[in-house]
Image (cartoon, helix red, strand yellow):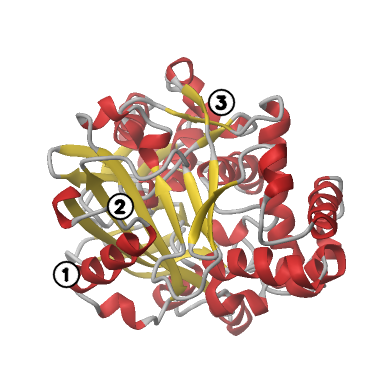
Amino acid sequence: MPQPQSWAILGGGLLGMTVALRLAQQGQRVTLYESSKELGGLASAWQLGDITWDRHYHVTLLSDSSNRSLLRELGLEQELNWVETKTGFYTGGRMVSMSNSLEFLKFPPINLIDKARLALTILHASRIEDWKALERIPVEEWLRKWSGANTTDKIWLPLLRAKLGANYTKASAAFIWATIARMYAARRSGLKKEMFGYVPGGYARILARMQDVLQRAGVTIRLNSRVISIRKADHGVTVRFADGSSIAPDQAIFTGPATTAADLCPELTPEETRLLRGIEYQGIICASLLLKRPLTPYYVTNITDPGLPFTAVIEMTALVDPKQFGGKRLIYLPKYVPVNDPMFEATDAEIQQTFFNALKKMHPALTGDDLLTFKVSRVRQVFVIPTLNYSQNLPPVSTSIPGFHILNSAHIVNGTLNVNDTVQLAERYIPRLLSQVPSRTPTVYETVGKL
């Protein structure tokens, strides 16, 4: 009788974990390999003083159906706390709220005509179904057409630079469409309110539950397993690790960055390698601060003024009950940068001085005594820049090497990098992969060994 295949999932972030779970639930033999000492990837948690919380900021939207379905499966969806949040802008050297329709009408940087065009842009984007047509249009060109020069210069471009830096000039209009579509869907689900959710305990709790569910489903987990090469084998592929060990599974799925896949697998075709190396990534420097007191009532403060070293202020305790942090206030200061940005080489102390001085400029009452903890996360390859005609240049998931597949965030072609899109990616591709892979027939040796 045909037997299940052996699968090696290379990468233990949320994508790899979800892929592993779904394969195991389909009766496959699955081992999940992660290079670090813990699972979770970008969703992992860390220690901030005596607090354990997410290394990067995450929220769940009402419209995040894939993520909510997974949380339901983990027995955690009913524990989601839903909070109506507020949005601020730091513009013209001062803090301005834009959390409802009246505040939008009063918003000082743009006039009423510009605001009407901005609203029309958002409404128009929310109704677009053919997102592929937007891939042919530079994002700035599309925004100037719909929102006008003033709104584009004062609102859209600062927000694009905040997320993409100078790389925004390479991005297509599909990027802003995806961002608008997700947030618009969330407001529609929340009766026009900006409702965000979180699980008490954060992703440390979600990942612990996920790991338990994986193991109960029969998934073997191997941590501290850094891949150094992936090559063809007589049956399947051979994967070698930094500790000198190797495996030869029937199927292997690599979930890390596309450029890393090209480095690890020299036997891919020149065209596959070209497509993989053509994927451009954006990195992040993200500081986590614990403060004695709150800064604002806003979950996110968008920054339109030039010159500040971070690109937004995320006040997590405007969403999460401060009791989760012993009354302390958790702030994230993200800066999205190119993969070769010099800030990656800066020390934590240098980043702290630069970031905290800028934060005090925004909030003059803030003092050094208010700062309890400052910690920096650096990730060079966080999300892919959605360049022109992106979906047409996307590397295929199943490669020319039998049994080797590359599935990663680069395959999120019509969305933004978030937990919901990541889970959705796994759910979409697992049936396709299983349909392409026949069940393995046992060898004579295996058959005789069971007699």
Q: Which residue is mark 1?
A: 349
Alpha carbon distance from label 1 to label 3: 41 Å
Q: Residue at x 56, y 25 (%)?
A: 69
In the rendered structure, which disc, 1 or 3, sits on the residue that comes first in sequence?
3
Mark in the foreground, 1 or 2: 1
Q: Quadrant of the C terminus?
A: top left
Under mark 1, the amino acid is Ala
Number of numbered tags placed on the structure image: 3
Q: Is residue 274 above or below residue 431?
A: below
Q: Amino acid at mark 2?
A: Glu
Considering only vertical position in the picture, is 347 above or below 88? below
The image shows residue 190 at horizontal and vertical percentages of: 66, 26
Question: Where in the figure is residue 261, as x and y percent of width and height?
Answer: 45, 70
Q: Nearer the viewer, residue 114 or 15?
A: 114
Q: Residues within 10 Å of mark 3 (few under 14, many from 20)?
A: some
* Residue type beneath disc 3: Ser
Tell me how far mark 3 sits from mark 2, CA to CA. Answer: 24 Å
Q: Is residue 222 visible?
A: yes
Residue at the image position 73 percent from the left and 74 percent from the top = 388
Is the residue marked by circle 2 packed among few (<14), some (14-19), or many (20+) residues within 10 Å? many
Q: Secondary structure at mark 3?
A: helix
Q: Note whether residue 233 is visible.
A: no
Which residue is found at the position 18% from the left and 66% from the top?
244
Q: Callout 1 environment at 10 Å: few (<14), some (14 to 19), or many (20+)?
A: few
- Name the mark on residue 34: 2
Q: CA distance from mark 1 to mark 2?
A: 30 Å
Q: Residue at x 57, y 74 (%)?
A: 279
Pick whichever of labels 3 and 2 is earlier in the sequence.
2
Label 2 element class: loop
Q: Quadrant of residue 193?
A: top right
Q: Which numbered circle lies on residue 69?
A: 3
Q: Is residue 264 left or right of residue 167?
A: left
